[in-house]
Image: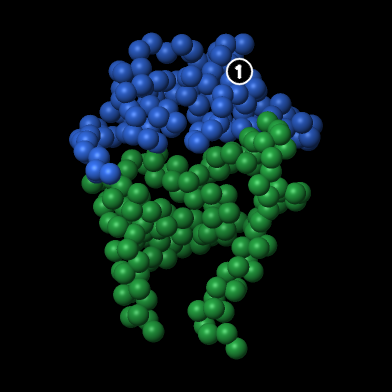
Amino acid sequence: MSKPHYDREHHVKKATGIGDPQCFKGEAGEARFKVGDRVRIKDLPDLFYTRTQTYTRGAEATVHEVVYESPPAEDESWDNTENVEWFYSLVFSMKELWPNYPDAFSSDTVETEIPEHYLEAC
Amino acid sequence: MLPPTRQKVMRHLDIVGHLQPSLHEETHAPAPDQVDNAHFRAYTRSTHDVGGEPDIPIPWEEKEEEVWEHNTFVTCEVLAWRGVWNAEERRRRQNVEVGQTQYLGLPYYGRWLMTAAKILVDKQFVTLTELQDKVEEVKKRYE
């Protein structure tokens, strides 16, 4: 087995002085969703790695902010940074996520960031 | 009386015996048709630090970081700076590649430290025998 040869500092070179995810700005094209849109989280296979929480799968949320462009965690964690997409800050109703959530706190929400390929319009 | 090394080994085996199986049912080397989709997903789930998993309430503690924890953090950042990994690969290795037992069983920065050593072996910056020799050398300083 030979040792792999590739530019292992490519990300450092790209992000130095700019920051991450700012260094991916402009690479994702047009955002599919806008603030206020209702979206549903796809239950994509969670094999090997994901940062899209299981409890959000199949739930509906409101886009609170279109936050930044970045490769999704599933790609970036193997240093694949070519496919950049928009990330959205989404607001979920706690009552909708957790069936036994008390009615007294029915206005509680939780906000989290999820990449575009997990989202579908609803 | 067993020699100290054997005592350590026996203690280790005792603890590991209590860690398995991860589900409270017959789970050792099941036939393929004994693992349904729900069990497959449970076994292959990727542990992560983004919350939302069932647990009992745990007390909030305001804990200062210790010197070894700061040193571990800096080491991991330097590994990123030198292109050994990026933050997402570090996170995947700390949270998922360690397996559920280590994820739940080791302190937070313990997983960072384990992972920093592991990636240097995985990516062939050091060999495992070099690491073994170094760990032995350092242990002897404290004997």
- Is residue B52 something one can see in this rendering? yes
What chain does mark 1 sit on?
Answer: A
Q: Position of residue A65 (x, y in %)?
A: 48, 22
Q: Compared to A85, does B142 lie above or below? A: below
Q: Compared to A3, does B73 lie above or below? A: below
Write down which chain is painted blue.
A
Quarter assignment of residue A16:
top left
Q: Is residue B123 left or right of residue A65?
A: left
Residue in the foreground of this view, choosing between B49 and A78: A78
- At x 65%, y 23%, the residue is A59
Write down which chain is painted green.
B
Which SS class for mark 1? Answer: strand
Q: Compared to A41, does B107 lie above or below? A: below
Which quarter of the rendering shows the N terminus of chain B? bottom right
Amino acid type, mark 1: Arg
Residue in the foreground of this view, choosing between A27 and B65: A27
Residue in the foreground of this view, choosing between B118 and A15: B118
- Is residue B116 something one can see in this rendering? no
- At x 44%, y 46%, the residue is B93
Q: Position of residue A106 (x, y in %)?
A: 74, 29
- At x 58%, y 16%, the residue is A39
Mark 1 Cα shell of 10 Å, populated few (<14), some (14-19), many (≥20): some
Q: Position of residue B125 (x, y in %)?
A: 26, 52
Quarter assignment of residue A74:
top left
Quarter assignment of residue A122:
top right
Q: Position of residue A66 (x, y in %)?
A: 45, 20
- At x 50%, y 79%, the residue is B5
Residue reaching furthest to the bottom: B1
Q: How is the protein colored in the picture? A: by chain
Which quarter of the rendering shows the C terminus of chain B? bottom left
Residue in the foreground of this view, choosing between A7 and A115: A7
Residue at the spot of label 1: A40
